Image (cartoon, rainbow, N blue to C red):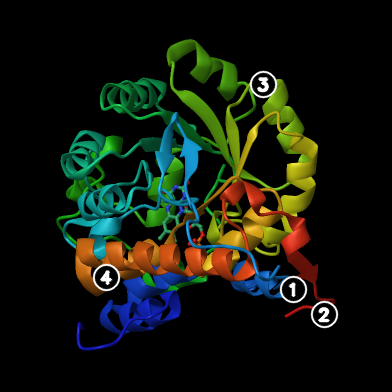
Amino acid sequence: PLAEKILSISDLERSASKTLPAATKDFYNSGATGQVTVRENSSAFQKYRLLPRVLKDVSGINTKISLFDREIEFPLSVSPAGIQAMAHPQGELATSRACARMGVNMGVSSFANHSVEQITAAGTEVGPIDHVMQLYTMTDRDKQVRIIRRAEAAGCKAIFLTADSPVLGVRYNEWRNGFQPPDGISYPMLERSSEDIRKQSHDDGFSSLNSDSHSWAEVPWLRSITKMQIWIKGVLTPEDVETAIEYGCDGVIISNHGGRQLDETPATIDALPACAKAARGRIRIHIDGGIRTGSDIFKALALGAECCWVGRPMLWGLAYDGEAGVQLMLEILKQDFKRCMQLTGCKSVSEISTASLGLVCTNGP
Ligand code: FNR
């Protein structure tokens, strides 16, 4: 694949989509039902235009932000996305190494194909990196506690409690293709072997592990058993931001699960401004969904996010060239973001504000 010139995330997507088996490509790329939200997550960024300030000295600009008491290279990290070994045998280990090499952080999905111990060790051998552990509310509470204890011992800084998935979204592609991970792939954090997984559909497997009776009471329960930070992943309304603050959460990820859960929710970039306004600096606001360019990152920061996360671009990078592919993905976004800061005249991330944005009125994408 390396003969191609990969200059953008869409180049990576195109390349990965050619090489992946059809059912895997569909599983990675698709959203729920009508695919409205998965499309709009990206296209909604086009409503905004950049307003550059000129003749600013941008020779020594700084793209860094601080997260978990440490600086990361630029305001991006890799979202927890499951089953990375379908994209490359090294899966999450390759992702962790690439993130460490590029100076950003990584979320570990509970559906990871390597253990949190292996994933954190792989990254840490390369360089400084922080991991967070993604969790659903599980039917087996003892198993959930075991995951939390393992994540804590492996040095994870936070639990990302995914709150948008009491049940799996309606994914026609998975049902049509009878999607199942290939033989030999397991979920070590969920204590599921390859044989266990292949006894059920992905949908039935999900609902046998995870509970649809979750509630905000999860937060004090988590607080009572772990010192890690607690973040809620999947918030889209100012009301839920307010509730997360009331419950003492450390952060929220404005997310619609990459359009894979409830279709026809707003694009996250459209949900962000009201959420950031409600937060008034009392809770950290991060965002994921559809971020594919440096100017997408810039726009999200201008509209009130502290940091962005990407899911599918990492999977495409893995499929393209494993660890080097994820590194390439991060390099593209970093250089693109840096160039965007320079061309808009922002010397540091703290200078990025709505003053750099114009809104283009359209009738939608
Ligand atoms: C995900 N995502 C996800 N989220 C989560 O909380 N737990 C999980 O196990 C997974 N698994 C997963 C698998 C795949 C194949 C994808 C594409 C996504 C959602 C993920 O964390 C993130 O919210 C989105 O991927 C962000 O959108 P983009 O960047 O993919 O558009």
**Whole-number angstrom distance, CA of label 2 to CA of label 4:** 35 Å
Looking at the image, is mark 2 or mark 3 earlier in the sequence?
3
**Whole-number angstrom distance, CA of label 3 to CA of label 4:** 39 Å
Residue drawn at (62%, 46%) of the image: 350
Find residue 44 and report its image quarter.
bottom right
Secondary structure of the residue carrying numbered label 1: helix
- In the rendered image, residue 214, in percent from the top left (x then y), is placed at 58, 31
Circle 2 Cα neighbour tier, 10 Å, few/some/many (<14 / 14–19 / ≥20): few
Looking at the image, is mark 2 or mark 4 earlier in the sequence?
4
Q: Which residue is mark 1?
A: 47
Disc 1 + disc 2, Cβ < 8 Å: yes
Q: Which residue is mark 3?
A: 247
Looking at the image, is mark 3 or mark 4 earlier in the sequence?
3
Q: Amino acid at mark 3?
A: Tyr
Q: Which residue is mark 2?
A: 362
Query: Which quadrant holds the N terminus?
Result: bottom left
Q: Amino acid at mark 1?
A: Lys
Circle 1 Cα neighbour tier, 10 Å, few/some/many (<14 / 14–19 / ≥20): some
Q: Closer to us: mark 1 or mark 3?
A: 1
Secondary structure of the residue carrying numbered label 2: loop
Q: Which residue is mark 4?
A: 319
Residue 254 seen: no
- In the rendered image, residue 3, in percent from the top left (x then y), is placed at 20, 88
Looking at the image, is mark 1 or mark 2 earlier in the sequence?
1
